[in-house]
Image: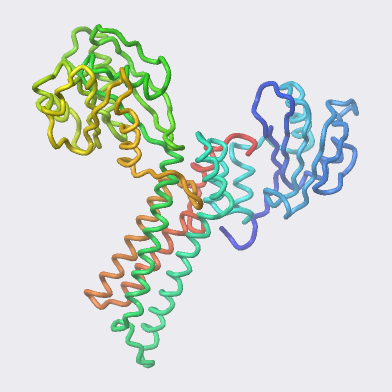
Amino acid sequence: MSDQPPVFKDTIAARATPSGKGGIGVIRVSGDRVPIICRAITGSLPKPRFASYTSFLDADGSVIDKGLAIYFVEPASFTGEPVLELQGHGGPVVMAMLLDRCVQLGARIAAPGEFTERAFLNNKIDLSQAEAIADLIDSASSAAAKSAVRSMQGEFSGLVRALTEKLTSLRIYVEAAIDFPEEEIDFLADEKVEGMLDSILAEFDKVTRKATQGALLREGVSLVLAGRPNAGKSSLMNVLTGKDLSIVTEIAGTTRDVIDDYIHLDGLPLRLIDTAGLRTPGDVIEREGVRRAQNEIKNADRVLLIVDCFSTKGEIKHKVGELLGEVSSEIPVTVVLNKIDLNPDWQQELEDIPDNWIPVSAKTGEGIDQLREHLKQALGYVVVEEGTFLARARHLDALARARESVETGRQRLIIEKAGELLAEELKLSQQALGEITGIVTSDDLLGRIFSSFCIGK
């Protein structure tokens, strides 16, 4: 972000409430022409930051609607510019007429996310706070919403800034020692530097753990239910979702297409995907179903490999091995041993089973709670605690690169005694952290971020 707010020569307008019919509809306008537009539509310029009940006038003086007008003066507004909000009745025709009137008076229709982008470019919020606004709107659970609010209020940004300050202090110390060798500061032998580096790395780990939890809350996880036909995938799907989504019959190969739904585990959004049974397909439809199943497995965050403990009695380990051979070793797998109610001897057959093998009965519900707990642990998720903020994949990437630079600098100091290289790595770490808040960014990144916003925000 620049030190001086940019000057936008155009004024933007958009409907800030969803399209369709509603009790209330809001038109938002931002830019230098707001005072002119406000006087033309309401007949006056209301007292700033006070809601005024008034008529909204068309070009010929006729009343389009009656409602509330709120005027914000710069810089005390969301965008940092003059802002007008017209709150009227939420009919699509009324909203369209008000928006058309704003355009007649010199505004243009805003692009998606343009109001928030102006807030960022006018130094009202940083980039991670801007992203948190979109994440709050898109929140899939109350836990995600609460975490998004924390990010929006600047908790994540504050942690990043604190890390940056520590890096800056250390970099100043290192560069001073390099630039003034006559002062006889032997920082290469000073344990203070190594201690500061260790402290910074520990702080990186702490922030990354929180960011990882936040990314899980935001991004969610895709779980693919895979296995042989009639292993109980559809039954398990129905039990986990609590819905009658997948057809369950005694006939093998009932599921031909991909069926998905979302559930939450203590706030963690999970996308469950039921797939066709893995076997040599018998017809063109089943062949397509198996192809789609294999494609979902390749793109899964984790695979629930369902094994029928009843039909594979006496050879469960062998059948599990066969199935594992059909899944890439790079994809995390949980083996779900289903139908244990029909095979009371399964424990004798499987002594010392791995931690990622979970016995269940989709019919009786036995083991389902244990499966849920296993998934939370396997995904590295803990119940949201105070201080958890929402994060994105790009934030995790930036944190990882920033930490890697500090670790590389530490090694070059200890092994190579290279203070100049340490200083350079600290600089690279600062730049990576700057990508999170937007101090260091590119127009292409901004375009991708704000284009994902809804219009009017």
Residue at horizontal 47 percent and vertical 59 percent from the top:
434
From the top left corner, tell me how far across and down residue 380 is, in percent: 34, 44
Q: Nearer the viewer, residue 369 or 275?
A: 369
Among the 4 quarters of the image, the one containing residue 414: bottom left
**Who is closer to the viewer here, 48 or 376?**
376
Q: Which residue occupies the foreground of this view, 131 or 376?
A: 376
Residue 136 placement: quadrant: top right
Q: Is residue 261 above or below residue 247?
A: below
> x and y percent of residue 152 in the render?
57, 49
Above or below: residue 193 compared with residue 240: below
Task: Name which residue lies at 63% across and 48% down.
Answer: 118
Instruction: Give left or right: position of 457 versus 389.
Output: right
Left/right placement of residue 72 relative to residue 390 reads right
The C terminus, quarter of image: top right
Residue occupying image coordinates x 49% and y 60% = 159
The x, y position of residue 341, in whole percent, is: 23, 19
284 w.r.t. 83: above or below: above
* Number of disc labels: 0
Q: Nearer the viewer, residue 31 or 147?
A: 147
Task: Indicate the quadrant where residue 25 lies.
Answer: top right
> Residue 187, how many percent across, how many down?
33, 83
Q: Quadrant of the N terminus?
A: bottom right
Image point (50%, 40%), residue name:
144
Identify the image's colour scheme: rainbow, by chain, secondary structure or one colour. rainbow
